[in-house]
Amino acid sequence: MRERIETLVQNLNKVIVGKSDSIRLVLVALLSGGHALLEDVPGVGKTLLAKSLAQSIDGRFQRIQCTPDLLPTDVTGTNIWNPSSGEFQFLPGPVFANILLADEINRATPRTQSALLEVMEEHQVTLDGRSRPVPDPFFVIATQNPVEYQGTFPLPEAQMDRFALSFSLGYPSQTEELSMLQRLTGGAAFHTIQPCITLDEVLALRQACAQVTLEDSLQRYILDLVRATRSHSDITLGVSPRGSVAFYRAIQALAYLEGRSYATPDDAKFLAPHVLAHRLIPAGHHRPQRLVADLLATVPIP
């Protein structure tokens, strides 16, 4: 299974230039059973990353372009009347996929955003009293532009809490951007990507990640960080127990990606800004990333 992971990383590196940390983080979110929120400016490769991942695992990819007029049924699906059969027929929405890209999710209204709450947590859609499971694995990559605020609706705390990780790709360096331009000579690299891992192997990798050991001292360190957010004077709302579980599973996935059967405090320190910051509501004008950095500097390491 380690070879399968290395093949998957190499496949993504064919089209995503110089973003090894971003590739590692999106794989952590996938293998930990969570979802990923990408907060970045347009044109840095967020959509390409989602499509390349779906292509690499041979999964079904669906995209939702979030706009203010998007309805909840445009996301989950709806029942339509079938005259030939004389009964209602369910028309599945784009959530019935293995990898779902919710592009510019903060442009959808709160009513439409809430349509994703159930499916992201319980992997099912309930309509007219009947629950329908989505494919397994099910992975949501949502994007939002942190610069534009006109015509947007901030994600509520319940929605943010359902994303295991939040991170940004950022601009490439000059060398990386030059390499990206040079690759254009050979045509679009995305179309050359072939599936290198199956959906069953993704599920097997998730089970393998769940076997990674976290010592009692590391578990207490995780809880110390989480509970410190709930009592911090500059934080209005701290991390929930769901965040603790997401932190734990993300650390397991990262350790497995690094080829280890055990986790270390360095794994927790690397992931803390990406797992905890977007779950915080700071008081005043404090930045969540800065608050997490302060906690990492003050909470004792085992």
Image (spheres, rainbow, N blue to C red):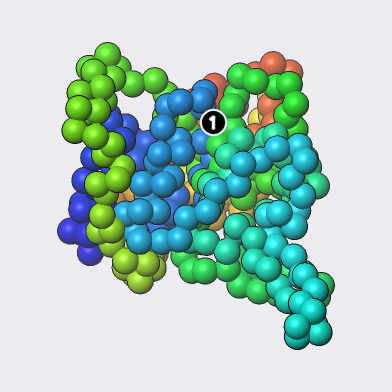
Viewport quadrant of the C terminus: top left
Please, what secondary structure does the residue beneath circle 1 have?
strand
Q: Does residue 35 appear in this view?
A: yes
Is 151 displayed left or right of 132 in the figure?
right
Identify the amino acid type marked 1: Glu
Frontmost residue, 261 versus 60: 60
What residue is rendered at 57% in x and 64% in y? Answer: 96
In x, y percent, where is residue 76? 69, 60
Counting from the top left corner in percent of width and height, residue 175 is at: 22, 17
Q: Residue furthest bottom?
A: 85
The residue positioned 28% from the left and 58% from the top of the image is 195
Residue at image coords 58%, 68%: 134
Q: Which residue is at the front of the view, 278 or 50?
A: 50
Position of 4 with respect to 203 (left or right) is: left
User: Dividing the image into 4 quarters, which one contains the N terminus?
Assistant: bottom left
Q: Residue furthest front?
A: 84
Instruction: In this rendered view, identify the residue nearer to me: 8 or 237.
Output: 8
Task: Report the number of discs.
Answer: 1
Can residue 261 be seen in this snapshot? no
Residue 159, percent from left and from top: 68, 46
Q: Residues within 10 Å of mark 1 (few under 14, many from 20)?
A: some
Identify residue for label 1: 39
Residue sitting at x 34%, y 41%:
23
Quadrant of the rendered image containing residue 224: top right
Instruction: Answer with left or right where residue 148 lies relative to residue 220.
Output: right
